[in-house]
Image (cartoon, helix red, strand yellow):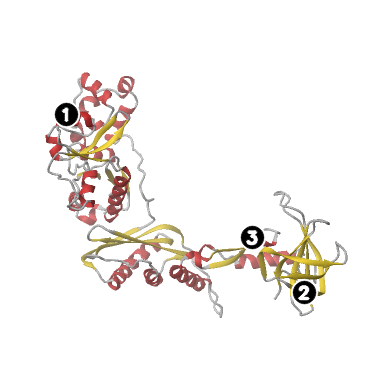
Amino acid sequence: MALAFPRLPIDRLKTVLPPEKAPDFTKPFAIVGRSVHGLRLVCVNEAAIHAGLYPGLSLVHARSLCERIETVNEAEEADKDYLQYLARNAGRFTPLVAYSLPFGLILDVTGCDHLFGGPQKMLEKVTAYYKGLGLETLSALTITPAAARAFARFGVNRFVTKEDFVLTLDRLKLPSLEAKPDVQMALRRAGFYCLKDIQAVSPKALAARFGEVLPARLDALYGKRQEPLSFINPPPSLYLSLRLEEPLIDVTMVEKQFFILAKEFFKRLTKLGLGCLMINIILYRVDGHIDRIGIETGRPLSDPVQFLSLLEERLKSLKTPLDAGYGYDTLALSVSRSTPLRPLQTELVNDDLEPAEIGQLVDRLSTRLGADHVLVAGSKESHIPEYAAFWGVAQHHKPHTEALKALDAQLKAQGFFPLHSNPPERPIRLFCPPQPIDVIAALPDDPPASFRWRRVIHKIRLAEGPERISAEWWKHSGPDRDYYRVEDENGERFWIFRYGEYPKTKWFLHGLFA
């Protein structure tokens, strides 16, 4: 299905400007934009067309034809945002929407038309919806996107069946090719007036005379060559909508309807063997406004009851509560990220929390507080202490408990660690960056006898070390570190290290033992 909004900039002004500031649209009016050759008309209203004006005409020429024409400068960014808003609204009819510039959309309605009573009824409903937003709308529905665009923009605003497709396309005039003006002029001089005349000529002859673009365009129109479409949103793994007989204003009733929709949604998702990691909740309001809410999970979600609890948490955590306005008439669910759903093996007797229960807890906390506020400690391969651990988002953390247990057993079986020995102790708390301290030692290479940290002197009773940790030589990150585990007279234990060679030696406190 192709939609064209030929007067979108003017229609946008009608909806944005208050009545006291809006120009008189019953008189000649035009949107003016800059081009290489100066100011030109971008969009004109019906009164301006009757005065002999048209898009592409220079402003100087336009004023010579109509002195009293009122103009407004083009706002490209605002027009783009408005077209994007219209594209989002098309999600109530199909999840696959692409731009068709200028001022148009392409909707892939494959498998959606039966929800609206057939293709003809769907075309009428889509057209009526956008006209209800105050837009002049041209629309067409046929078997190829290129032909639908041509039908919508060049006079055949209806549903064209497969049987009437070729006959209707043959009758289109040359402007439907959307070729350059010099190519269209050359085609007219050659005696061509409609697409049927051009079809009688071989593609090689057309390419030799008018270039490769013309036969490629003809093949796209007749469906001999498929033009790729860049959809605004990637096709979801599953999309399911629910059209309500009466608009809903109460948020509690909205949650109940989403639970009904979620039962069928997750039933279909389970049949596909998928679990969702990112689910989109879309609420279409009667006045065209769309509310979108995303829920991200760490583990594959396939339970409607769990989804409802996450939805309740998400709605409570919204900074701006939902505004139903005149009510929501359509609700939809879609999956933007999914993963294969695998069955989990649980133990018969286990007093500990199951991984699934922990995952559900993490999902609820992340939905309520935000994923960036629920963190988990993780480790990575690095012999530098401050790089060996990190804090990561809990939902993105994948526990590998069983794999780690198997690896630990394998290392012990192979004698990786010597018998009756443990790896060097590490403190529970590390300072980042390490804290500088003042140290007194008998000799530069001896363990410290005392040190001062935060204006407090600690006399060392016991010291163990040094444990040398070399720098990352491939990064040229500095000299080696000599670490000591020390205990003062009060029984407090510290992890300190010597950095650099004498006489430029520096000491740092890196961590505290429990």
Q: Position of residue 86 (x, y in %)?
A: 27, 50
Within 10 Å of the Cα at label 2, are there few (<14), some (14-19), or many (20+) other Cα atoms? some
Identify the mark nearer the N-term, 1 or 3.
1
Identify the mark nearer the N-term, 1 or 2.
1
Task: Note whether residue 282 is visible.
Answer: yes
Q: What residue is shown with label 1?
A: 64
Q: Is 393 located above or below residue 48 in the figure?
A: below
Q: Amino acid at mark 1?
A: Ser
Q: Is 14 located above or below residue 210 in the figure?
A: below
Q: Position of residue 136 (x, y in %)?
A: 18, 45
Look at the numbered disc 2 and give the secondary structure of its residue. strand
Within 10 Å of the Cα at label 1, are there few (<14), some (14-19), or many (20+) other Cα atoms? few
In the foreground, 434 or 2: 434
Q: Measuring 14% from the left and 45% from the top, which residue is drawn there?
A: 24
**How far is disc 1 from disc 3 in space, using C-alphas?**
74 Å
Q: Are marks 1 and 3 in contact (CB under 8 Å)?
A: no
Q: Position of residue 298 (x, y in %)?
A: 49, 64
Quarter of the rendering containing residue 311: bottom left
Q: What residue is shown with label 2?
A: 458
**How far is disc 2 from disc 3 in space, using C-alphas?**
33 Å
Q: Amino acid at mark 3?
A: Lys
Q: What residue is shown with label 3?
A: 380
Look at the numbered disc 3 and give the secondary structure of its residue. loop
